[in-house]
Amino acid sequence: MNKKQKNIKDNCDGWRFALFYFLSFAAVSLYGTYGSLYFRRRGVSDVQLGLLFSIPAWIGIFAPMVWGIISDTLHQRKLPSLIMHIMTAAVFPLFWYWDGGNFWLLCLWMGIFTFVFSASIPVTDAWVLDHLSHRGGDYGKIRSWGSFGFAMSLLASIFLLKKAKMSTAQDLLPVFLGFCSLRIISGLYALSLPDYHTRGKRPKLDWKDLEVYLHPFPLIFFLAVFMSRFLFSPYYTFFTIYLDEMGIPDNFKGLFWVVAVGFETGLIAISGSLLKRFGPVKLLLAGLWAMAFRMFIFSVNPGWHIILTTQCLHALTFGAFHVGSIQIINKITPQQFRASGQTFNGALQGIGSVIGGILGGAISEKYSLTEMFRIFAILAAAVTAIINLLFYIWGEKSISQTINKSKN
């Protein structure tokens, strides 16, 4: 194979992973956007909702690590990805058939669903980074297709869901059908992707190599990852409900998420140049500061057009933070533990989501959603200032120092 043919093949493989991201996130968007609204319409209270959505956070602490270790131990990504996607499609319909009576049964189903769902994206990230290390390419350009799939799925929901201001849980049936179909398709499609992790000699795993995580820079980074999800988990849980209380129709709710993901997609697509110019730490901090401002806007009861405009900041609160975080965890983690590293990153987010979700639910139940956003905006600003100072002391130069220590 000559150089030109090799470049064509590498580009084709990159597009194949881009399509996998597209299919995977198209399903994730339906559950992430309409899941909490569905449970609310089934009679779940704010406190119960906070508890229910703390379960994915609890399970997310260890489940991604389990799948990451399985993937690294088996030295492959394909089989774990297939199992996770198909099992998720099999479990998700249980939510639809819940009779509305036994809340603890609903919690059990949520736990099972989360176990097979939570690690699919981190393992995919590790898989794509495997591809890039072997074939080269731009992570941002590939990953942006996941955000594009997220947005396209929500655009479809605008036409498939009812336009009435007053709707029922049954009106969200297209969400269930779309989610299950997309998970099955993406699971089967995973079988066609190249699995680089299976090639060559398999290195022996020495878990002592992960002592690199105990150095100052990684510890500050992990604190930032934890706090990002702690501070923003109420947004993911309650934002659609917040729109519902404003009287926004179901089909129009999706537009708010489409705008957010649209700007996120644009930033991720150019993230390669942003990383070269600013570095991953500045992207992390930009995401945290934007998070504080965004929560403040939600707390002052603005008009729907102001909220829609504010959704543009999702490019920073998710896009910039995500790109920066996976680059850092990939740099400081030994190669043979890349999947475990990405899933550990997800586990920290799970811990943050547990605390943030429960606290957010309790505050909104006692006061209101706007008061909850106000409190979290203040917390976000204070915490970000502290993290900013810590990164100033142990800056980006510590990344290379940490990597060198891990190799010694």
Image (tube, rainbow, N blue to C red):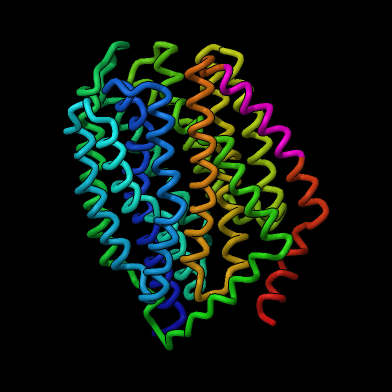
The percent position of residue 28, horizontal first and vertical second, equals 36, 43
**Taking 38 as reference, is 106 above or below it?**
below
Question: Residue 104's spot in the image, x, y percent?
Answer: 29, 35
Q: Nearer the viewer, residue 330 or 192?
A: 330
Residue 95 falls left or right of residue 208:
left
Q: Is residue 301 magenta?
A: no
Q: Which quadrant of the view contains residue 158? A: top left
Q: Residue at x 30, y 26 (%)?
A: 38
Image location of residue 241, percent across then percent down: 41, 21
* Residue closest to the far bottom: 201
Point out the stretch of residues depicted in magenta.
371-385
Q: Residue 49, located in which quarter of the rendered image?
A: top left
| Occupied quadrant, residue 254 | top left
User: In the drawing, does residue 397 fall left or right of residue 256?
Assistant: right
255 vs 4, nearest the viewer: 255
Residue 199, image x, y percentages:
39, 82
Residue positioned 68% across, 36% down in the render = 289
Q: Which residue is at the far right?
A: 393
Q: Residue at x 54, y 75 (%)?
A: 207
Q: Please count the marks in the image.
A: 0
Assign the C terminus to one quadrant of the image.
bottom right
User: Magenta span has 377?
Assistant: yes
Image check: 239 left or right of 107?
right
The N terminus sits in image quarter: bottom left
Which secondary structure type mostly characterizes the magenta part of the structure?
Answer: helix
Is residue 372 depicted above or below 282 in this figure?
Answer: above
Q: In percent of the image, x 57 and y 52: which residue is there?
A: 323
